[in-house]
Image (tube, helix red, strand yellow):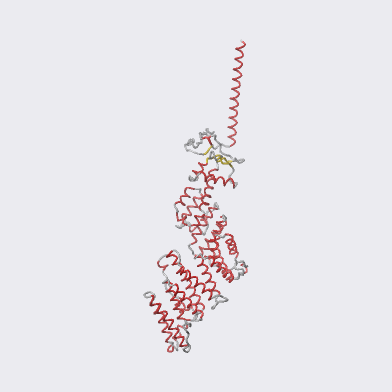
Amino acid sequence: MSDEESYEYEYDDDEDEQMGGDGGSDEKEFDYTDDDQSNHDEGEVALENAYYNAKGLRETDLTGAEEAFLGVITLEQGELAKESGGEDTHGTKFGPWSYKSTKQLIKLHLASNNTSKAMEQYNQLLLCVAGGVVSPNAIEKGVNSMLERVSASLNQSNSASGAADDASKELASNIYEKTAQMFHPQTGQCPNERLWFKTLLKFGQLLYEMNEAAKLQLVIRDLLRGSGQQDGAGGGDTSAATASGSTNLMEIYALQIQLYSRQKDNKKLREIFDKAMRVQGGIPHPRTLALIQELGGKMHMQNREFDAAGKTFFQAFKSYDEAGDSARLRCLKYLVLSSMLHASSINPFDSQEARPYRDDPEIVSMTNLVQAFHNNEIRKFEGILRRNEGKIMDDEFVREHLADLLRTIRTQVLLKVLGPYECISLKAIARELNGIPTQDVESLLVALILDGRLKGRIDQVAGVLHKSPEKGVPTASVSSSAAGGGASAPSASGSTSATESGGASASGSSSDVVGGSTSSIEMRNYEAVDTLASALENLTAAVTSVSGMGKSSSLRVM
């Protein structure tokens, strides 16, 4: 992020209110421009000047600014006491300048990490709100701004120390709880269902980031009840919900899915994901929808439903892309991962939506990975992973599925290697699979045989795979040197197959494959010729033997 993007201009909520944010403040600001200008309240002018003088001290003197803002509150309370005929308000009556000053004091205490004073001033802010001195629009804007600052302060504490301190966590929890109580639609001092829902939703997200699962479940229960889900578990009829109710439900489901995904509770995760996908009406934010779809895709991956995972990740990628969120690249990586695990022949980058990101610096490595996968270039494939090109292996989710990914491409290459042969040594296969241990080769072969994708048997003593010949399918000839290690006899084509002892083929290249490439018909012909030759040899030997016996008999007679 550049300096310009990270710079936060201090354009305060009270300045927005003066420009029309509180619905009517414009007239108040310009009342003194009409015929009654001479009668303008001097006290109001003094309050305004005192407030802006205090704001001017924030950058140079925090202590002086704090005292000045407290002075504004005291001054306004005095003015209010005069207007009420000298009645003592005991410091409980606040005006609009007190509301603005209190907000500034909260910001100062958050910046200095003074949690006790920040909580004290926030309680005072809620009293200002309850006093009815601020318009509903200004209240919602101001409270949301304060809640965001509290969350930002907690996150800043997290990044600075690696973990938020207990005081910051307690402050954040207390502020959200007090706010939710104040604006509760039925029991709050200042009922505001919209603000109450937003507050609880932000509180739930904060609890998720703080890993407070027990409190988060209570917040989710209150949100579901507030949205009309009487059982507090999202079991209502989502199809009949209003548009705003459906949107709210999607926000709640997103929070639930995050919780169950972290807890690895796939049963509840699937239940909520299915409900979220059935919600009709409403226009949830694309980022909310993308989050639900991304976690749903991960759920499918955990259940080895790679095809469904790919489709869900693709939808998540499109939703993130619509929201302009950089998480779209992460989802695109997951889409590629699920596509390879499904052993799909379709390149994910061929889609119209993904094609523009093919040459993105973060995606180029995934593009190369897919090409190596489809071309069965296992050495190139494993090299990309080993060198961690594009920081592929930095993603924990990718690392979780690395073993499955390697097994998939090795199986794919293994089937291609076995294609033309009837017998082949496990060591030969291991070398074709980039030098993996023969035990891993045997494991892959056993899995293929059990799945019915390969018919054959493994000679563990000799370290050889014997494929079962299929009817009508030519197979390779089997040499008697398969287990013995000697060179095989030349085939009809004149080529010789080398064994593990190092024999060379007629073409000059060594091979560990046992047997040649003669068809089964030719094999039978050669066997018949061998049998006939053997029979002729036996006949010749018999004739010779009989002839010799005849000569010896003649000699004895003579």
Q: Is residue 195 above or below residue 296?
A: below
Q: Closest to the observer: 350 or 31? A: 31
* Residue at the (59%, 37%) spot, across then down: 520
The reply to whether residue 26 is visible in this rendering is: no
Name the outermost residue toward the left.
60
Q: Closest to the observer: 291 or 34? A: 291
Q: Closest to the observer: 416 or 178? A: 178
The reply to whether residue 386 is visible in this rendering is: yes
**Measured from the top left, where is residue 282 in percent x and y?**
57, 68
**Measured from the top left, where is residue 215 in percent x and y?**
53, 67
Q: Quadrant of residue 454?
A: top right
* Residue at the (47%, 89%) spot, across then down: 85
- Assign the C terminus to one quadrant of the image: top right
Q: Quadrant of residue 518?
A: top right
- Assign the N terminus to one quadrant of the image: bottom left
- The image shows a total of numbered marks equal to 0
Q: Is residue 494 above or below residue 231?
A: above
Q: Is residue 557 above or below residue 72?
A: above
**Measured from the top left, where is residue 498 in percent x and y?**
50, 36
Q: Is residue 517 above or below residue 339?
A: above
Name the outermost residue toward the top.
558
